[in-house]
Image: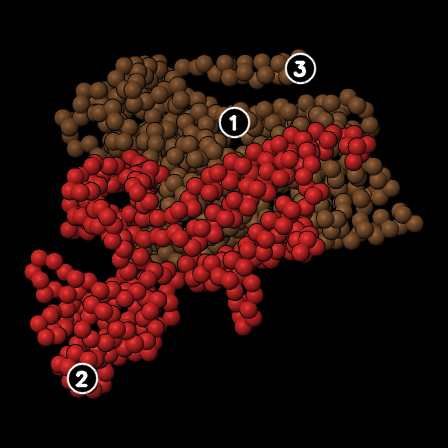
Amino acid sequence: MKKVVLLLSVFLSTFSLFSRDFDYRDIPVQDGGRIKPLDTFARNQLLSIYGKRSLKSEDVPAIDWLIDLLADPHIGFKQKVFKLRNPEVVQSLGLEWDNIHTYSYHEILDGLESQRELLIQIHAKPVDELSIIESQLKELHANFQKFANMWWHLKIIPPISDNPEDSWISPWEVESEQALSENQRNLLFNFLEYLNKKLQNDTLGMDMAMSNYYNELNTNYSILIDSHRLKLETWYNEANMFYISLAFYILAFLLLGFSWVTAPILLKKIAYFSLIIGFLLHGGGLCLRMYIMQRPPVTTLYESIIFVSFIANLCAIILEYIRKDGLGIFIGSISGAIFHYIGFKYSVDGDTMGMLVAVLNSNFWLATHVTTITIGYGTSLMAGFMGHIYLGMAILYPERTSSLKEIYNNTFGITLMALFFSLFGTILGGIWADQSWGRFWGWDPKENGAMLICMWHLMMIHMRLSGMVKGPGFALGMVLNNIIVALAWFGVNLLSVGLHSYGFASGIAINLGLFILFEFLFGIGAYFWANSKQKIAIK
Amino acid sequence: MRSIIRKLGNPKIFVFTIMWMMILVFVGTIAQRDMGLYYAQQQYFSNWLAWFGPIPVPGGRLTMLVMFLNMISLLFRHTLWQMKKVGIIIVHMGALLLLIGGGITAWFSFEGNMVLDEGGESNFIVNSQQSELAFINTTQPDYNDITSLPEKILKNRNILNPTDLPFTIEIIQFHSNAEAERRTQSKGDFYHGLAKNFLLLPKENEKEAEMNRAGILFKISDTNTDADGIYSLFLGQSIPQTLQVNDESYTLVLRRERIYLPFAIELLDFKRVLHPGTTIPKSFSSEVNLIENDIPRRVMIKMNEPLRHKEYTFFQASFSQSDSGETSILAVVKNYGRLFPYISSLIMSFGLLIHLLLQLPKLLSSKGKKRA
């Protein structure tokens, strides 16, 4: 218990470290329907153009890249920030395919100019008829426009009213100085002053402008803008808690591995500790997101990945606490690492804190149904991992019947838990559907996916009950259960994406297919192998 | 009898039925991609028999009925009634209730739409999947008598003789989705209106049932006037077909089936709010007057906040915008079984929780082997 308190206090103190002053990174912008710090805006702009959230070649953070671009477009336009991954696109623009394949504004401009007719043709075509190269050209064109018109996209001037539903405007949209209120003018001028001083490299002047800007914001816009939340988001961007959490998971795994070789209890304890730290960082990141967006933990596919992984690790930590034999650390560290990795893949799609469409815009149902069903996914996968462990153990150590029996019981217990959350979550989803569409059940793919998971659990539990399966069979069932979960979770999205599943979505399809194939082959293969081993062991 | 019940309550039967149900759900879900949600649901889930190609297999309804019988018989097993299985008993009771509710919904519920223009008023629901053939008697200036024939009885070669109509109707062709093709040569006087110059050709159903355009060809006889003859109608036809029999005049329409309500709804204002600076919708809402006995009551219908009145529930479902103004589309549901899922889910979750609390400490501890 003391350890937990210690850990928590260390953890909380990291939060208090961050009572810093407002700076240029926290300047509020309205983008994608919400107010976010300039830092997030810059990261997402750079992400869509360059593919990363910072300029790797010069080690410049996105925010500084953006500020430079705004302060002095001449220099900004010379920077090679357009990343082209497809040599065919590069060729069609008449550019040189080199090792870094990044290009500057002017290079892209000339290239696009030469392809003007093709572009007109592409824009006239319906989206689902575009070939890969055409859609990439279209995307490049859109990115280029955005880059060239950055001032227009920078909705940095808050409305006169305090209404959060009102649109902000960008400096380009200002018709004349008189059209702005005094407060708006002061805010904008201090921002421009900041850029000006930045150009002159006048640090003192920059600080002055920024503190004037902040005073203006604080006195006149405190209802509309929560500067504390802006600072927190900037901090969240910078802290990369999920990366650090990943590092701790990997560390836990390595330590556990060493502890098997050298077998000291100490290393295992440190591994457990490392897993817990990773888990706390993981949870901290989730909490921060909830606070920044003021909504429940799971609202998008990306967040569901992070949250499923969080739940799976919670189970793993509890399991380790009960069993104390390293099994929990093993499962937790591996699943945590894999999910973080998948999460990073998803986060390159853009702002991970997007706004929600009308039907989802209900904190009550997001908090109840979505959270429960996602916990259901997490616990189901956990039961699936246990199935892997059982089969692996049965192959390696078929003679250890008592510890196999234990794992079997653990797996069954987790399956019961998974059934509870999946079933409850599915029914809550039905009730939500009843509330918003007037029908409890509509046989819609997402609903059916959730129901398949519940039915699979019910089937396995009744198979065990009626003696149709024993340990290996049940473990096989739970391994296959992972396939069902993956299909319900990701596969359903592909079904509706359908036609325009190019680029990233087709990547999902392939990965999903590989995962299913692997689980299927592993499950069946390991099952028969384990069975034959068992027979030998009995003889 | 007792042995039959014992056999029926075997959990193995449950395993096989649920396996079959999973296959059905899986195939039915994939099929939605090609045939659309509505038809896939009709074919696989809301059916006693489903067809896998030419082979008849148990459909969703039959499978769930077996599941229901299986669970009922389980409750007659003496071995179940033990204190340590109390959680299991509760869960199964809840599941039974859920299936009963599903049955009630499947038989007695009704879904439709109400389409309202801003400033407009309506007192009927439209069933967007079914059509009806309506004969509107327009003789009296201040009211209309409507006789409507639902799609169910619009079968080919059906001869219909509604009591309030002075003629006989014989259905020659009815297609739930059809197209018109111009005849090479126009027909004689026995053919009226559209039927004179156009042929009715069947078309495959659209993926979304609402997109279907039904068509009908029928014969009217026994009027003893020129009005006898063959008529043709299409859903959403712009020129109305009229009919004069003696002193009575009728307008004939093939339209979406209507269900009239004992009250009316008037749309005052439809609002769509976007997240600022984007095209992502943040909320939809319709401000309406619920008019009953000529007394209006102001109500706000929003996403996730429906209006419930009598047995009907009105949901904000969709909208359209045109030059003439905004139109709000409300989904209307009448369902007697809607409370079942609420109750049964509470019961099931409660039962599962009890079972978990009884079992988990044993299952998760590493000493489980000693007790198991």
Q: Which element type, helix, strand or loop, lies under badge 1?
A: helix
Query: Which chain is displayed in red in the rendered image?
Result: B
Q: Which residue is mark 1?
A: A285
Q: State the separation of the CA atoms marked 3 and 1.
A: 23 Å
The residue that appears at 30% across and 18% down in the rendered structure is: A222
Q: Nearer the viewer, mark 1 or mark 2?
A: 2
Q: Residue at x 48, y 54 (%)?
A: A495
Q: Is residue A3 left or right of residue A107?
A: right
Pointer 1 chain: A
What quarter of the picture does the N terminus of chain A occupy?
top right
Secondary structure at numbered mark 2: loop
> In the rendered structure, the residue with mark 3 lies on which chain?
A
- The image position of residue A21, as x and y in percent, is 40, 15
Q: Choose between A302 and A236: the one closer to the eye.
A: A302
Q: Measured along the vertical axis of the image, is residue A370 above or below residue B262?
A: above
Disc 2 marks a residue whose amino acid type is Phe
Q: Which residue is mark 2?
A: B190
In brown, which chain?
Answer: A
Asked if residue B190 lies left or right of residue B139, the reply is right
- Dot 3 alpha-carbon crowd within 10 angstroms: few under 14, some 14 to 19, many 20 or more: few
Front one among A229 and A66: A229
- Check the residue under mark 2 and report the chain it is in: B
Question: Which residue is tagged 3?
Answer: A1
User: What's the residue type where badge 1 is placed?
Assistant: Gly
Mark 2 residue crowding within 10 angstroms, few (<14) / some (14–19) / many (20+): some
Residue type at mark 3? Met
Please state which of residues A273 and A344 is positioned toward the viewer in this rendering.
A273
